[in-house]
Structure formats: structure tokens, C-alpha cells
Amino acid sequence: MSRLTLALPSKGRLREPSWSLLEASGVDPQEPGERVLQSHCRNADIDLLFVRADDVPEYVQDGVVDCGITGLDLIEERDCDVEVLLYLGYGACSLQLAVPREDPTRTLADLVGRRIATSHPRIVTRELAARGVAAEVVKVGGSVEISPRLGLADAIVDLVSTGSTLRTNGLRALDTIFESQAVLVGRSGVEAGAISDARDRLRTVLSSVINARANRYLLFNVDKVNLEGVVALLPTRGSPTIMDLATSGVVAVHALVPAADIWTLLPALESRGASSILTLPVERMVP
Ligand code: AMP
């Protein structure tokens, strides 16, 4: 069986969540030694290469590695020919158009003839063309948010997750230019065979963890007379499991529910007669 090579971010924001996803998947990735860029997984035929998230698109495109984890914004910005195999659900951020707080600009269209600083010039140029706005794009390497204060530009487009950096720098977000998150990418045009099979296996295992993280296993008891009312509240896609208890007239209900709904669901279930309510994390989930 041939080995799969996977590039992982060696530092920065995507490093820790990428590593923990791989750990949760059970492939048992081995920590690289200090200054070592390569490692392997104990439970799977996967070799790991630790590189900057910035470099992953080229490494995958050029076949240095079979697949890699990086930000979708970096794939688009580098214009690399790679295939997105899986959206990983972390590293979520967006490229936001922002102007100084006191600037009266309301929309992107108001920036005709003005300068926009960004470290994502390709994505911004493409978006300006798509919206028919003739503005000048100024490429900056880092600290994009101070460009207006330095007189380099009238507006910026920068990666934002919470918006606090924008606020700290006296900027106001106007519009979303691009939505990003971490992705698993592979080389385009890989033919059916050992490598594409190994990629499919990795995608299935990682997606089982991602699906599981987004859900909780919910259990509770309810009197049969209240069953219809509580089941109607469940935001489950499939059918819940309903089991008779030793106490007659009472049933146990088990269901898989989105983690994001738990907050509102539990009080609602309780008020309709559910008791002994438990939620459990789900380790793996293959739909
Ligand atoms: P790094 O520069 O190595 O920390 O990685 C930057 C990548 O992390 C970006 O290309 C995005 O895909 C992702 N990211 C997630 N949230 C943010 C954020 N608030 N600012 C910058 N990058 C972010």
C-alpha cells in the first residue's frame, strides 16, 4: 500500500486545530522533533510534512505532497490548481472591507478611484472586477490595518475573525469580500489508484470527526402522554430511538442533535416534561 504525504501548518493559527483534528481522527500523528520538519502517523500510512500554511497550496499543486491543510483564502490568493477535498470547519474568518471610522464611505462602490490596501490583492482585484468598481489595489505584506493611518490607502481588505483588531485600529467593516475556513486539499487530476484511495480514506476519517463535533447524543425520559410534544421539538434529521422503560408509561428517547441547538433545546424539553436529560459528545459519525 503506498504512503500518503500530508502537509500540515507548522505554526500560526491553523497549526493547533489541524493537529488536534488529526489526533482526534485516531491516526496517531507523531510529534516531530525540534527543528525536524517531517514525521509520520503510527496508525496509518501517512507521512507528515510541517510547512507554513502559506506554502501548502504550492506544495500540493507541485506534487511535493499528496495533500495538505491550509486556509481557503490562501488557495484562492495563490491561484493554485488544487482540489478542495474537505471543509474542516475551523480557521473561520472573512476578508472584510473596512474604512476609518470617521470616513463616510458606505459601500465598495464609493471607493471608485481610491486606494485599497490588502495582503490578498488577487482576491480583491477579482472582486472589484466582478462588482465593476475601478479602485486601486495596494499590496502590503502585513499590518494591513495601519495602512490608512500611514496614508498608504483609503480603505483596507483584511482577514477578520472577531473584528476586534479592526476596532482597535479605529476601522469600521463595510462589506465581506471572501469567506474562508481551513480546508483539506489534494492535487488536481489524481487518477484512480492507491493515492486516491488513501486520500478518500483520510477524507472519510476526518469528516467523521468534523460531523461528530457538530453533534451531541441526547438522552432523556418522558411520560408517554408527553412524548409527541417533546419529539416535535427535536431538531433531528433522522428518527429518534424510543424505548420502553421498566416503569410503565415512561419511555427513554435517544437522538442525535446539532450541538448549536443544545442551548435552546434543553429548557424547552424540560418544560414539556422531559427528565433525566443527558448529552454526550460523539466521537465519530459517518452518516
Ligand atoms: P498564519 O498566518 O499561519 O497564522 O495563518 C493564517 C491563516 O489562518 C489565514 O490564511 C486564514 O486562513 C486563517 N485565519 C483564521 N482566522 C484568522 C484571522 N483572524 N486572521 C488571520 N488569519 C486567520
Image (cartoon, rainbow, N blue to C red):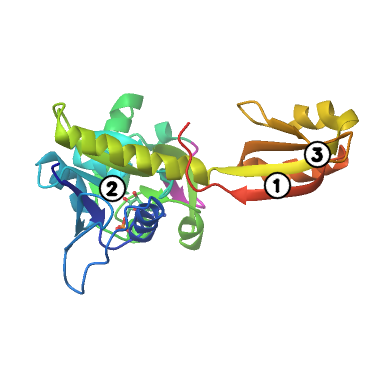
Q: Position of residue 66 (x, y in %)?
A: 16, 42
Residue denoted by label 2 = 69
Q: Quadrant of ligand 1?
A: bottom left
Q: Earlier in the sequence, mark 1 or mark 2?
A: 2
Q: Earlier in the sequence, mark 1 or mark 3?
A: 3
**Amino acid type assigned to the residue bearing label 3 in the image:** Leu
In depth, the one of 127 and 183 nearer the eye is 183
Residue 245 numbered tag: 3
Which residue sits at x=89%, y=33%? 249
Task: Please give the range of residues in magenta.
Answer: 97-106
Relative to residue 65, is residue 153 drawn left or right?
right
Residue denoted by label 1 = 263
Q: Quadrant of residue 244?
A: top right
Q: Quadrant of residue 200?
A: top left
Q: Is residue 81 visible?
A: no
Q: Quick one: quadrant of the N terminus?
A: top left
Relative to residue 257, is residue 94 drawn left or right?
left
Q: How many marks?
A: 3
Which residue sits at x=28%, y=27%? 129
**Amino acid type assigned to the residue bearing label 1 in the image:** Trp
Relative to residue 267, is residue 196 drawn left or right?
left
Q: Secondary structure at mark 1?
A: helix
Q: Quadrant of residue 217?
A: top right
**Crowding at label 2, few (<14), some or many (≥20) Cα neighbours within 10 Å?**
many
